[in-house]
Image (cartoon, rainbow, N blue to C red):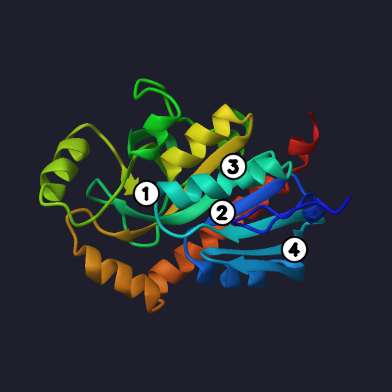
Amino acid sequence: MTEEQQPHTQLTTEIGTDSAIIVGDPARVDTATQLLDDVQGWAFNREYKSILGTYKNKRILVMSTGIGAPSAGIGVEELHNVNVKKVIRVGSAGAMQSGIGLGELIIGEGVVRDDGLTQKYVPGIYPAVPAFRLMALAHKYAPQAVYGIIRSHDGFYMDDNAKNEAFWSGKGIVGADMESGALMTIGRQRGMETLSILNNVVLYEGDLAAGVNDLVNGDDLMAKGEVASLKLALDILSDPSLEEE
């Protein structure tokens, strides 16, 4: 019997890997091709664009999920359905502390789940945290990155955004994105190992629109940060220690 494709991502177990990188922007999938060998296009349905490639002889899937927790959550669930066990998000973030420069990598030690989706899975008191093995490897390959708690939220244009950001900055949050909470919460429920590596594209209290537009336009610092974050994820997922179950 022919295996039915996953309805949104169009994945099947024929991808033949237990390791994946998820990104928000489909264009970031194209960037990943520069770092991979033997690249094979898989699917592009809705916001879910996927490729397969090898890195240090490890077969890895790279797939976009679009913006926000709901679409990221669908992607994680469908990755689980095709036997993916390790997922690293490579995305963009806004700094929540002064002194974090553009293009610096922010790696989440845990996530404030300020989104709506994950509340449907588990109560708000449930923590969203990365897998220890993947975090340890992040420290091995990127000891200079910014490590700390990040906040995942649902939108940019609410009237109280500035007030909320000031509150969470005061609690020591280092960065903000929209998908890491969904990745870590759903991944933990499904027995997957997860990690989130974020490229800072907005200085704290900086201009959000300018920062995102600069990322789209390939601003040098942020473009370098994007490649560095992808390479870090590939180094982690191809580390031989992960084959030691």
- Looking at the image, tell me whether mark 3 or mark 2 is earlier in sequence order: 2
* Amino acid residing under circle 1: Met
Can you say whether 29 is above or below 151 in the image?
below
Instruction: Give the number of the mark in front: 1 or 3.
Output: 3
Which structural element holds mark 1? loop
Q: Residue furthest front?
A: 1
How packed mark 1 is, by other alpha carbons closer than 10 Å (few <14, some 14-19, many 20 or more), is: many
Q: Is residue 10 left or right of residue 179?
A: right
Per the image, the residue denoted by label 3 is 77
Q: Position of residue 56 (x, y in %)?
A: 78, 57
Give residue 178's mark: 1
Per the image, the residue denoted by label 2 is 22
Instruction: Give the number of the mark in front: 4 or 1.
Output: 1
Can you say whether 108 is above or below 17 in the image?
above
CA–CA distance between discs 4 and 1? 27 Å
CA–CA distance between discs 3 and 2? 12 Å
Q: Position of residue 174 (x, y in %)?
A: 31, 42
The image quarter in which residue 172 lies: top left
Q: Nearer the viewer, residue 222 or 143?
A: 222
Q: Position of residue 237 (x, y in %)?
A: 68, 47
Residue in view at x 70 percent, y 47 percent:
19
